Image: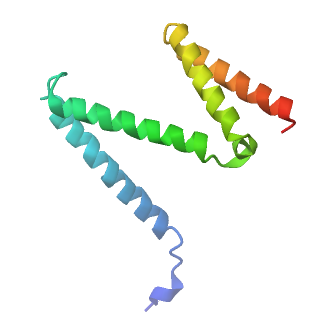
Amino acid sequence: MIGYETFDYWWWPYLFIAIAGWIATDMWRWFGVLVGNRLKDDSAALTWVRAVATALVAAVIAKLILYPTGALQEAPVILRVAATTIGFAAFLVAGKRIWVGILVALSLLIGGQTLLGL
């Protein structure tokens, strides 16, 4: 009889992550489809979901600006905040064209880092 120790189970954690990750996310997607079809666009529940989603995105952006990792960490905080603020203003002035805001913020960030010699 072959013992348990003789098999190589290196793949087990990957299988577990794949199955657990799929179940954890797919369950909520199906729940959203089932419940979302019954909600009106102006319902309190959907307004709350949009508010939470917006808050989560804002928190991630704030974390990336204030506590970055990698090469962006070398840029001063004031440069990161200024590039974000001016980029957002350009986005609004350009009629909410996202590519304008991104290009302006990125240009300011790269230009500022170049001027500072980073």
- Drawn side of residue 107 relative to residue 23, left or right: right
Q: Position of residue 38 (x, y in %)?
A: 12, 29
* Quarter of the C terminus within the rendering: top right
Q: Position of residue 58 (x, y in %)?
A: 45, 36
Q: Nearer the viewer, residue 10 or 111?
A: 111
Which residue is at a point 84% across and 30% down the rendered structure image?
114
Q: Position of residue 86 (x, y in %)?
A: 61, 21
| Residue 73 visible in the shown view | yes
- Drawn side of residue 103 relative to residue 112, left or right: left
The colour scheme applied to this rendered structure is rainbow
Which residue is at a point 30% across and 33% down the rendered structure image?
51
Which residue is at a point 87% across and 36% down the rendered structure image?
117
* Quarter of the N terminus within the rendering: bottom left
Which residue is at a point 59% across and 18% down the rendered structure image?
101
Q: Is residue 75 above or below residue 84?
A: below
Question: How many labels, in total?
Answer: 0
Q: Nearer the viewer, residue 42 or 27?
A: 42
- Drawn side of residue 96 relative to residue 75, left or right: left
Q: Nearer the viewer, residue 24 or 42?
A: 42
- Drawn side of residue 77 relative to residue 96, left or right: right
Q: Is residue 43 above or below residue 29?
A: above
